[in-house]
């Protein structure tokens, strides 16, 4: 999902490609030129990061060896959205592009993305092992399948096991259950884990995935946006109440770091790895960083606490599309198929980068943490924000305004209702 606040402007690329490395590699041909038109044994691939030394790079290498198709990766590590729009509108765009999931519906309406239905039907692709909501995410109202989810990254709470034991607090559940793990239980636990000046009990509101997760769990029917994507529903009472609840962990309970102290890159990860934060709401793709940098304590994972209405969580969906004007769409499709196959998906899972789309890849999950299997369980407890024609425009309006809420200056209901007319207008722009 797009993240627009200062503190989260670079977090999507870091979260979703946290294992990605630096310089180019001979195994993956990289550069800025386009492949000569129509060469079915080569393809170009625009990505928001270099994939060298990452599980993604390993998966592409495996595809090249298996298929004989050369993949020319074109990394754009900064200002990717600008480059993405530029190349997508060109007469010879790359054959495959990373697409922010927030762009899929709007770009589909312009005709810039290829409908993959013909490939899915031609190859009689078995998607019975894919999570239905993630597989259907790029399907448009006319039935066209204009993008492809290659993997996903569910959110759970990472927690410091030693801090729980030190405070004499029962550990969170090891299964997906509300027993002893409601919002009230979570809040009381965070209070017991907090040591003023030394450790905060929890951090919820920095990862923007909390907006959908906690509003749905509080009883909002749709979360951030209405089902048809035309209305801003985060302003409705149950959703706004959830935003306020998470904020009150700072403003009322003083168990969560102040918003102003989280405005530097990786502030949350540093607090957690240094033992100064006991519970952190974050994605699966955070795991490699924690596994490498947690030295002095044991960490584990737990499901989000159950709200008054439900106990769901949001996954970030890793989405790619073939431009309608791609020179080598067949080769691009073969890569997409491989990345969502058992063979390709297991490479993501084994590298703790993402969860593969095929559920038969999930047996490759490995500890630490001890209960890493809860990420696989998250697939059955999933919520996704509804798509809109202008999600990024909407978020550019309401998320900066929420800074006043998170800084304890205003109430969530007031700010979100103030933002609603402008957000609704943005959602309905022609």
Image: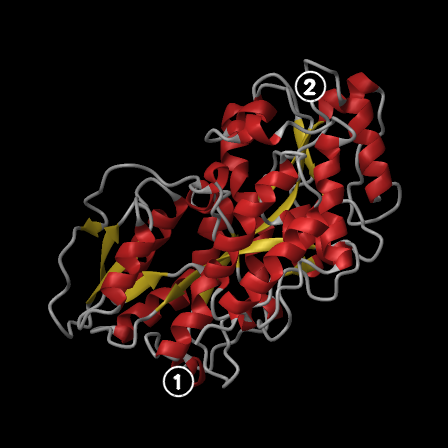
Tell me where residue 348 appears, x and y as whole percent.
Answer: 46, 50
Q: Earlier in the sequence, mark 1 or mark 2?
A: 1
Q: Is residue 147 placed above or below 150 in the rendered structure?
A: below
Residue at figure coordinates x 65%, y 50% from the top left: 415
Which residue bears the numbered disc 1?
118
Q: Residue at x 17, y 73 (%)?
A: 91
Residue 133, by quadrant, is bottom right
Q: What x and y, as percent, mark residue 395? A: 52, 55
Q: Distance between the residues labelled 1 and 2?
A: 55 Å
- Place of residue 428 in the rendered image (x, y in percent of width and height, measured from the top left): 51, 73
Is 224 in front, or is 348?
224
* Furthest-right residue in this view: 179
User: Does the image show residue 224?
Assistant: yes
Helix, strand or loop under label 2: loop
Query: In the shown orientation, is residue 231 left or right of residue 110?
Result: right
Q: Where is residue 54 in the image (x, y as percent from the top left)?
A: 37, 42
Q: Which residue is under mark 2?
A: 199
């Amino acid at each position: 999902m797009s993240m627009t606040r200062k503190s989260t402007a670079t977090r999507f690329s870091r979260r979703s490609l946290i294992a990605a490395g630096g310089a180019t590699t001979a195994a993956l041909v990289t550069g800025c030129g386009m492949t000569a038109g129509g060469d079915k044994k080569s393809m170009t691939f625009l990505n928001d990061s270099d994939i060298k030394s990452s599980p993604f790079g390993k998966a592409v290498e495996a595809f090249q060896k298996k298929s004989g198709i050369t993949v020319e990766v074109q990394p754009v590590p900064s200002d990717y959205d600008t480059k993405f729009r530029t190349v997508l509108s060109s007469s010879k765009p790359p054959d495959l592009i990373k697409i922010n999931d927030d762009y899929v519906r709007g770009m589909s309406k312009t005709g810039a993305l290829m409908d993959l239905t013909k490939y899915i039907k031609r190859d009689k692709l078995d998607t019975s092992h894919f999570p239905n909501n993630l597989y259907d995410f790029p399907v448009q109202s006319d039935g066209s399948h204009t993008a492809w989810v290659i993997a996903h990254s569910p959110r759970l709470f990472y927690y410091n096991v030693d801090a729980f034991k030190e405070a004499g607090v029962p550990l969170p559940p090891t299964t997906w259950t509300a027993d002893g793990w409601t919002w009230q239980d979570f809040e009381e636990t965070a209070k017991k884990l907090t040591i003023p000046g030394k450790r905060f009990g929890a951090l919820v509101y920095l990862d923007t995935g909390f907006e959908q997760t906690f509003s749905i769990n509080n009883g909002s029917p749709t979360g951030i946006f209405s089902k048809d994507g035309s209305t801003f529903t985060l302003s409705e009472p149950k959703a706004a109440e959830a935003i306020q609840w998470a904020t009150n962990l700072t403003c009322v309970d003083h168990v969560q770091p102040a918003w102003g102290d989280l405005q530097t890159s990786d502030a949350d990860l540093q607090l957690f790895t240094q033992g100064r934060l006991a519970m952190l709401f974050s994605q699966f793709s955070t795991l490699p960083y924690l596994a490498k940098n947690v030295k002095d304590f044991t960490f584990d994972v737990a499901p989000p606490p159950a709200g008054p209405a439900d106990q769901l969580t949001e996954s970030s969906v890793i989405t790619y599309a073939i431009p309608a004007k791609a020179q080598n769409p067949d080769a691009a499709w073969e890569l997409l198929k491989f990345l969502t196959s058992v063979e390709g998906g297991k490479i993501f899972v084994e590298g703790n980068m993402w969860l593969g789309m095929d559920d038969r890849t999930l047996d490759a999950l490995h500890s630490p943490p001890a209960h890493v299997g809860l990420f696989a369980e998250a697939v059955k407890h999933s919520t996704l924000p509804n798509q809109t024609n202008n999600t990024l425009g909407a978020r550019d309006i309401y998320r900066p305004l929420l800074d006043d809420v998170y800084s304890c200056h205003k109430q969530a209901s007031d700010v979100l209702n103030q933002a609603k007319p402008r957000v609704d207008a943005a959602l309905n722009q022609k």
